[in-house]
Image: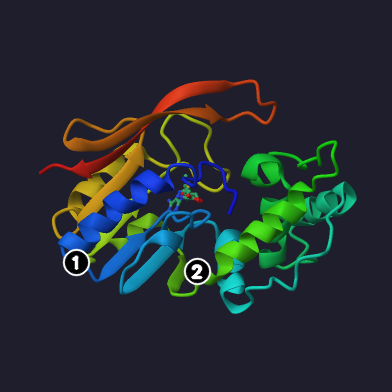
Amino acid sequence: MVYQGNKNRISKFLVPIIQKYIDDNNIKTYIEPMVGGANIIDKIVCENKVGGDINSELIALLQYIQTDNEIFIAPEMCTFEHYADVRENRRLHTNKYSMKYTALIGYCASYGGRYFDGGYGRDSKGGRSIYNERVKNLKEQAPHLKDIKFRCCDYKSFIGYKDCLFYFDPPYKDTKQYSIQNINYDEFYDFLRQLSKNNIVLVSEYNMPNDFKCIWQRERKVQQKSDRVAAEKATEKLFIYNE
Ligand SMILES: C[S@@+](CC[C@H](N)C(=O)[O-])C[C@H]1O[C@@H](n2cnc3c(N)ncnc32)[C@H](O)[C@@H]1O
């Protein structure tokens, strides 16, 4: 799914690293507490897979897609007027549209996966429909979501788990936050240290405190602004907690 901060482009590097930790350590449960567009978990092979996220509309959509790979609720097209109506009803909490439908329109018809923050994703000249392409991509992803247990929860609810592999992909510190919740990063780091006592814990970030070891890195271009001007370089890294 096109999603703000999604790891689709670098999944070909991250997935083999994560998968090797799972296989080498005979891990039976893989947990991704900030699953977003499920662009990593959908490629992982493990007996049990759990995807959590604090965003209830996102989780409602992912759970729905598991029951309907053809996504029958998706309208054939999504005009700006319809997009704006869904956005306004969401803002006013009217319940005119279900959470899953709101999420579908928000992710597929917004610019750059920025959800309703990003504005309507206008179709380009040659008749290319951003909305239709995204729905098509979601249908292609759907069969790969089947064996995942999706849960709407805060990452902290995973305290107490043992012998699992956790992969965290938080909103990057000091970059644009998601509307749902700001993260207290010091608390987050402490949580990861605790969790690492009984689990393997991997984290995607640009920077982490010194007691986390970087095991992979790659420079990439990031675009955070919907005006496409602010493309800047950043180094994507994968960390493990180094006790
Ligand atoms: C960078 S995105 C994950 C992208 C995902 N890896 C992908 O490839 O699509 C970060 C996610 O963290 C979620 N999030 C933010 N705060 C959270 C919290 N306290 N607990 C759980 N999830 C949270 C956001 O809703 C968002 O979906």
Label 1 CB less than 8 angstroms from ligand 1: no
Task: Classify residue 47 as left or right of residue 102.
Answer: left
The foreground one among 140 and 5 is 140
The foreground one among 163 and 55 is 163
What residue would you read off at disc 2?
145
Q: Is residue 147 visible?
A: yes
Task: Classify residue 133 as left or right of residue 78.
Answer: left
Name the spot of residue 238 as percent of width and height, x first.
30, 40
Quadrant of residue 74 within the rendered picture: bottom right
Name the spot of residue 7 as percent of width and height, x first.
46, 45
Q: Furthest residue to the bottom? A: 67
Quadrant of residue 154 within the rendered picture: bottom left
Does dot 1 land on a helix, a strand or a loop? loop
Number of marks in the rendered image: 2
Residue 90, above or below 61: above
Does dot 2 land on a helix, a strand or a loop? helix
Name the spot of residue 62 as percent of width and height, x first.
56, 66
Q: Is residue 91 visible?
A: no
Classify the position of the N terminus by image quarter: bottom right
Crowdedness of circle 2 by 10 Å Cα count: few (<14), some, many (20+)?
many
Name the spot of residue 12 as percent of width and height, x first.
40, 47
Q: CA distance from mark 1 to mark 2?
A: 24 Å
What residue would you read off at disc 1?
162
Task: Classify residue 145 as left or right of residue 105.
Answer: left
Residue 134, above or below 97: above
* Amino acid type of the residue that numbered disc 2 sits on in the rendered structure: Leu
Task: Name the residue: 44% across, 71% down.
Answer: 148
* Amino acid type of the residue that numbered disc 1 sits on in the rendered structure: Lys
